[in-house]
Amino acid sequence: MIQRCTGVLLLVLSMALTVGEATAQSGRVTLSGTVRDSTSGEELIGAGVILRGPTEAGASCNEYGFYSISVPPGTYSVQFSYVGYSKIERTIKLNASTKLDVRLKPNVELKEFVVVGESDKTRPINRPDIGVERFDIKTIEKLPVIFGERDVLKALQLLPGVKSGGDGSAGLFVRGGASDQNLILFDEAPVYNPNHLLGFFSTFNAQAVKDVQLYKGSIPAEYGGRLSSVLDIRLKEGNDQRVKFSGGVGLISTNLMVEGPIKKDKASFLIAGRRTYADLFLKLSPDESTSSSKIYFYDLNTKVNWDVGEKDKLFLSGYFGRDRLGIGEAFGLDFGNLTGTLRWNHIYGPRWFSNTSLIYSDYRYQIGIKSGDADFNVRSGVRDVNLSHELSYYQKPGSRFRFGINSIHHTVTPGEITSTGTGINDVTIQDRYGWENSLYTSWDKTITDKLTMAVGLRLSVYNVLGPGDFFNFDGEGNVTDTVTYAFGTTPFTYVNLEPRTSFSYMVGKNTSLKAAHTRTTQHVHLLSTSAGNNPTDKWITNTNNILPEIGDQVSTGWFHDIVSDDNTIQLSVEAYYKWLQNQIDYRNGTDLQANDLVEGDLLFGKGRAYGVEFLVRKNTGRFTGFVGYTLSRTERSIEGIDDGAWYAARQDRTHDISIVTMYQVSKRVDVSSLWTYQTGNAVTVPSGKYELDGVVYFAYSARNSSRFPAYHRLDLSLVLKKRPEAKFEGSWAFSLYNAYGRMNAFSVAFETDPDDPNRTRTLQTSLFRWVPSVTYNFTF
């Protein structure tokens, strides 16, 4: 089976290469190069390049700022452009293939504020991608924020089709997917827990982020391993012109970034750090338990890049972040991520561009509990080592091939409990190992002036590796037998083909229709009993019982731009339907911690998610913003739960509305507001109770058949900037989170009413009524 699937993919690769070479006209010459920011050296992702002359052609820079355009020889006018930058236009004689690197200057007199950073006032609606969102960091800077900290994930949660887990959750739920079904990449390294402080902050320091792109519909073939979406976040490269300091000081956190040249125009560095200091205020408490408690996080981003020569560039980036939460000596929680990426860009020729990366990712958590003379420690985590290589071939304008290979070794530590002074034996759940390999190819093609397409194919092969004990269970979750495999064996192998197809058809100058089909598979899974990401959730991999999750999504959409000299308004409607296989849920009473036989408590079945998303967005002018609305359902059907009937998944929310407004009062004053409404989380409530040996037990209704109260809140923000003649840039950001004091439900619990034992009462926990904040941001 593996040989047959591999042969199919290799055949596709060879055919693509043959077709590409055969159709490339020998009479063409190629203009290629890199587009950067003149003040910092940052590569400009998506910058536009247009040639006018004997023929007209255009291209956008890739994610590394590289472009390539092949045209007949002749004299051309070449224009380079990017939102917020002054255009450059040059006349060039192209009698042979030519390399032309340019640096664009920021347009300091630009009066428009752009919400989404595309290469023109209008988004390229003729592109075949659908369900793809790109956020400009300047947008995030203007949004109201909690505790004064700009947050990438909180901004993404405002988009149609993207939902949050509520207050205290930085998890994403994209088009009905669970929080673990999102591939979150930070400079190409996977991040397994994107949260700080239990979800009030995200892992990503917006100060150091360069680009944010979310794929929720048509996912390119180069991405794999998750079912629902891809969030690709790129770190800034570092300023190669001058040393620059920037940061922000808030009520409970401070961040600082320094960047500068190692060798001007050739090499640069970046270091960015954050820390909260709420724990410092706890030390002022007269209560010893409170003053010795911990509640803080810190993280550090680093990056070095070096132009080795005209054709080679090296990047080395890393992230390290930890959270420390504790109550005196009685309880402590320590968790965090460690990632590293070594990347090599190489230009083989004017049409050939490659990227090779060696990536490391490690997520760990540890819990310490002390009671009297007894100590408990719980440890869990997941570690990846990843090698990838991708080759891009720019055949001619409007035609690009990609070929790639990816290999990941997974080491998952589901859990380990050690104890002292208790007389209880230590518990160790065996580590699981997996080797995930993939080959992929894709072709982006402009077929006619109206029709464009992107097709791709990905072959995913997952090998479950020994050593380990693997269990077989009966229908009640009891072990029937155990099989032991030694180190170096591959007891189970899963092979899947993942086709990807998308089209765009222009039905007018500013209107397009799009459609796509995407198949994805997932081999690592998160066991969680909460709606959001908790640091103590447990990661597991495929075994003989746990099969790869498989998802198919079809989506279609209508896109229209209303363009004038001063304003651009974007309208879109997207509809989608997902079929999901091998979805995971739990038997009632499942214990996810310290349970080596947890697979016996898992139930498997199918899922479906469908919905329609509406978006109206004004990108330019003094008044900008957007209105997004999602109408959707997310359901599961699993044998052993409600007799196999369809039930709402925990992340199911029928209605989701976001209204974001931003207004530039003057060059020094910006105001913004954010209002969001969401249907309450699905929850299972008691339908009755009984008493056994003096203990009251609740009997529960159908799975997730009730709801939390609806969630809604209003946030406000005011930004005051320093005068233009000031020696350095600075601004004060004031915000009010939950302006009208809505007490939204964070969690609910059920207990017997002490005044009437025959009744059950619901206890709702809410986190915040109002949260004011102030932050001073600076750059010099």
Image (tube, grey):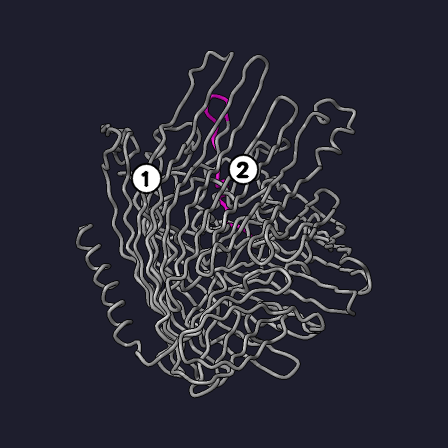
Position above or below: 128 against 482: below
Amino acid type shown at disc 1: Gly
- What crowding class fits label 1: few (fewer than 14 Cα within 10 Å), some (14-19), or many (20 or more)? many
Using the rendered image of the protein, determine whether residue 501 is visible from the camera's viewpoint: no
Label 1: state its secondary structure.
strand
Task: Please check the rendered image and state whether residue 683 is part of the magenta-colored stretch, yes or no.
Answer: yes
Task: Say if mark 1 contacts mark 2, CB within 8 Å.
Answer: no
Label 2: state its secondary structure.
strand
Q: Position of residue 497 (x, y in %)?
A: 27, 56
Q: Position of residue 177 (x, y in %)?
A: 44, 53
Earlier residue among tags 1 and 2: 2
Q: Position of residue 750 (x, y in %)?
A: 56, 37
Q: Which residues are magenta?
A: 679-695
Position above or below: 400 against 425: below
Q: Using residue 576 as the reference point, say whether residue 324 is left or right of it.
A: right
Residue receiving disc 2:
336
The residue sitting at 44% across, 60% down in the picture is: 311
Query: Looking at the rendering, which quadrant does residue 713 occupy?
Result: bottom right
The residue sitting at 48% across, 54% down in the picture is: 308
- What crowding class fits label 2: few (fewer than 14 Cα within 10 Å), some (14-19), or many (20 or more)? many
Looking at the picture, tell me which residue is in the foreground, 147 or 305. 305
Q: Using residue 401 as the reference point, say whether residue 39 is left or right of it.
A: right
Looking at the picture, tell me which residue is in the foreground, 312 or 230. 312
Tell me, for residue 434, which label it has, or none: 1
Looking at the picture, tell me which residue is in the foreground, 478 or 273. 273
Position above or below: 147 against 714: above
**The C terminus appears in which quarter of the rendering?**
bottom right
Amino acid type shown at disc 2: Gly
Determine the CA span between mark 1 and mark 2.
22 Å
Q: Using residue 191 as the reference point, say whether residue 280 is left or right of it.
A: right
Looking at the picture, tell me which residue is in the foreground, 204 or 503. 204
